[in-house]
Structure formats: C-alpha cells, structure tokens
Image: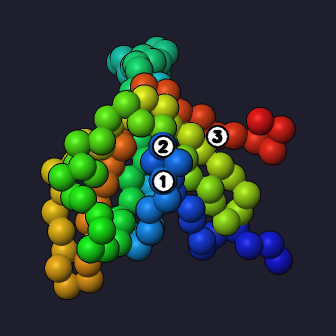
Amino acid sequence: MKDIAGQVFFKVDGSQYSVAGSVTVSLGNTSKEALVGHTGVDGFKVLPKAPFIECQFRDFPDIDLNKVERLQGVTVTVELKGGKNGVLRDASQVNALELNTEDGTYTVRFEGKSGEWLTAQD
C-alpha cells in the first residue's frame, strides 16, 4: 500500500511553519449551484470563490503572532504525503488568531486570488 495521508509541509513565502493538526485545502476558483425550478434542475449558477488553505499551527516562542495575523499578499504552499502539492497565490491570513494555551496551537486560514494543484511536471 502507498502512503496517502500524514506528513504535511506548509510554507508561507518560503518560510516553513510547524503544522499541528489537519490541513484543509480548497484551491478551486469557482463554486457551482443548481438552479431548480418547478420542473427540476434548469441549469447551474457559477460564481467566483476565494480558494483557501486552513490549518492549525504550533506556537513557538520565536513566532510573532501579530505578524502571522497580518500576513497578506503571500504565496502559500502545501506538500502532502501522497505526493500532491498545492499553491495559493496573493493570499492573506483572514482569521482573528486564537491561541489555545492547552496545546500551544492556533488556526490560520489563508484566502487567495488564485490556487492550483501542481503536478510532477510543473
């Protein structure tokens, strides 16, 4: 069997952060919604959406939480155990950071202008 989940490498403008929990990645740039009438589905409405990457970081003494909370215009990359790599461009951290003092973690959510999954050829 192949490894398909587990270790994740998370970088913001090339600086690596320690991931403490799961990572959620949504790199699509559109959402689709069914338009339903009295006779069934008439078609679909396609709207732009902000691609995002959200995860839990581990806090360390040298981390400036004020700086992390204000990150904007950055490139975020994730390298997943199964071989998939994602990139989020022109991204901003949008969460109000809440530090969990029991386990030293905080959740970040980066939303960007564009996102894509990279293949081995990219």
Distance (Cα) linking label 1 and label 2:
6 Å
User: In the image shown, does 116 or 31 lie closer to the viewer?
Assistant: 116
Q: Is residue 9 left or right of residue 71?
A: right
Residue type at the position of mark 2: Asp
Image quarter of residue 105: bottom left
Residue 15 placement (x, y as % from top left): 48, 53
Three-letter code for the amino acid on which mark 3 is drawn: Trp
**Residue 59 makes an appearance in the image:** no
Give the foreground label among 2 and 3.
Answer: 2
Ranked by sequence position, the earlier of labels 1 and 3 is: 1
Circle nearer the viewer, 1 or 3: 1
Q: What residue sits right under mark 3 in the picture?
A: 117
Mark 1 belongs to which amino acid?
A: Ser
Which residue: 41% across, 73% down?
20
Write down the residue under mark 2. Answer: 13
* Residue 23, percent from left and from top: 46, 60
Can you give x and y, in whole percent of width and height, for residue 118 in the image? 69, 40
Q: Which sits in the foreground, 20 or 35? A: 20
State the image coordinates of residue 64 (x, y, percent, origin top left). Answer: 24, 59
Q: Residue at x 19, y 74 (%)?
A: 100
Packing grade of label 2 (10 A; few <14, some 14-19, many >=20) is few
Local secondary structure at mark 3: strand
The quadrant in which the C terminus is found is top right
Query: Quick check: 11 left or right of 60?
Result: right
Q: Are marks 1 and 3 in contact (CB under 8 Å)?
A: no
Look at mark 1 in the image and give the residue it sits on. Answer: 15
What's the residue at 48%, 38% (across, down)?
Answer: 75
Placement of 46 over or under 80, stated as above or below: above
Placement of 62 over or under 39, stated as above or below: below
